[in-house]
Amino acid sequence: MKQQNETIRPRALLAGVHLNENNDFEVSMKELHNLVKACDMDPVARVDQNLSCINAAYYIGSGKVGEIREAVETLYVDYVIFNDTLSPSQLKNLQREIDVPVWDRTYLILEIFSRRARTKEAKMQVESARLQYMLPRLMGLRDSLGRQGGASGSLSNKGSGEKQIELDRRKIEGRISELRRELERMEQEREVQRRKRTQGTYPQAALVGYTNAGKSTLLNKLVELSSGKEEKMVMAKDMLFATLDTTVRKISLSGSQDFLLSDTVGFISRLPHSLVKAFRSTLDEIRYADLLLHVVDFSDEHYKEQIEVTEETLKELGAGDIPRIYIMNKADSVMEEETLPKISDNRIYMSAKYGIGIPELLRMMEKILFSDYQEAQFLIPYENGNVVYYLNSRAIVHSREFQENGVCLTVSCREGDREKYKQYLTR
Ligand SMILES: Nc1nc2c(ncn2[C@@H]2O[C@H](COP(=O)(O)OP(=O)(O)OP(=O)(O)O)[C@@H](O)[C@H]2O)c(=O)[nH]1
Ligand SMILES: [Mg+2]
């Protein structure tokens, strides 16, 4: 007897084409494997082929299609997943030959996103990306959804073929523009909120990087040191795309100034373009940041390629020129602990999980975030406690002296703050 809570995970067959010039084939197949697991499926078989060019009709050679069909039967496969984006006609042709739903890498990523999205905005962004992907592929997807049986929406209605597809198409187009309008409205709201936030003088840093690099773990570590409040933490998990929603937290640590830190969705190679576009507004936290913390999983042998993918995506988002610190994270698994943290230029080898290198990282951040700071000395009367409070959190306080007629603070602060309280300046 099966336990009640034991769920049976769908079984997936992974299919890929190794093109002659592609050196990253194995890496991307392994990544596909992890994506399949992140989608709660079991990768149970793999079919691949060396080719000099992609087969126009089936993507993979037609002989291999037969092999896949056989494996589907003998291994009880529920889904066949291709390691690339299939063209609408390839999808349609494959779906005619294969008896279970055929997905491609893009659809798989969209599916993961759609399962993980929690906020209304993230859900709408994913829906919009998914519909844009589906629009040119209705023919193939209709067959696929028909095979899943009981799939939701009008796409699963069998019957009057072309006519039904035309109706679906119009419905989808209508929904896409509805989503676009609503997302634009939300984007404006987000912009107002963002302005409100940045009107204060807190500088903002953003965590960016390949999925699973440790961004959320680092955010949590800083929140823990900052307020210790568990409800301010975000989910960090050994799973691709654990984070989809953007979070912004204020980090207040003794011995350093307050700043805002945002955590957002991770990147992956060949992240569907429609998704990057759909997520643009949430990714604004990155675009408007004063500093990017590029978190790298230094224990992954492919970390260099992952840095490249992340940098490419940042460029695409218009965040190519923002100053960066490269956080070579998870160094605890590949370097001797005594050698950590190690700093060279704008790189720091550290460990977010074990909290190694945090003070050093904060010092590196300060140099960039507070680079326009100036020295100043204020004498603030005791009745203006709020000014002392303000400067304590937004300036670097070098010394504090309690004198007869007020508190004397020697600080480094922003030009704007110096101006704001110039009546108290003594130097
Ligand atoms: N050994 C080691 N593991 C770490 C370190 N930092 C994070 N991890 C682990 O890496 C996994 C992924 O961490 P997350 O913080 O969820 O990664 P992320 O970058 O937020 O990932 P996504 O939100 O999925 O893009 C978790 O299992 C963490 O425990 C580290 O410094 N050392
Ligand atoms: Mg995360």
Image: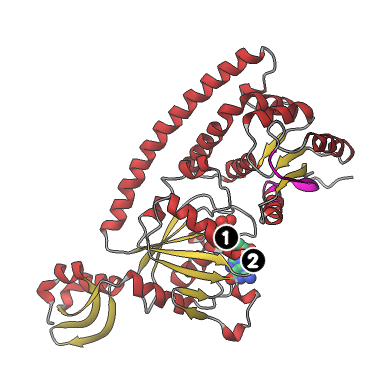
Give the x, y percent position of residue 123.
52, 40
Decide if residue 28 is on the left or right side of residue 265: right
State the residue in front, 160 or 395: 160
Q: Which of the image's four quarters has the C terminus? A: bottom left
Sequence-earlier tag: 2 or 1 = 2
Q: Does residue 235 appear in this view?
A: no
In the image, residue 47 lies in the stretch drawn in magenta? yes
Give the x, y percent position of residue 119.
49, 44
Q: Which residues are magenta?
A: 36-54
Q: Look at mark 1 in the image and give the residue it sits on.
A: 306
Decide if residue 139 is on the left or right side of residue 386: right
Give the x, y percent position of residue 193.
33, 49
Q: Look at mark 2 in the image and give the residue it sits on.
A: 300
- Compared with 247, 371 (above or below) is below
For badge 2, the amino acid type reads Asp
SS assignment at label 1: helix
Does label 1 point to a residue whose CB lies under 8 Å from ligand 1?
A: no
Structural distance between the alpha carbons of marks 2 and 1: 9 Å
For badge 1, the amino acid type reads Gln
Marks 2 and 1 close (CB-CB < 8 Å): yes
- Compared with 139, 17 (above or below) is below
In the image, residue 224 lies in the stretch drawn in magenta? no
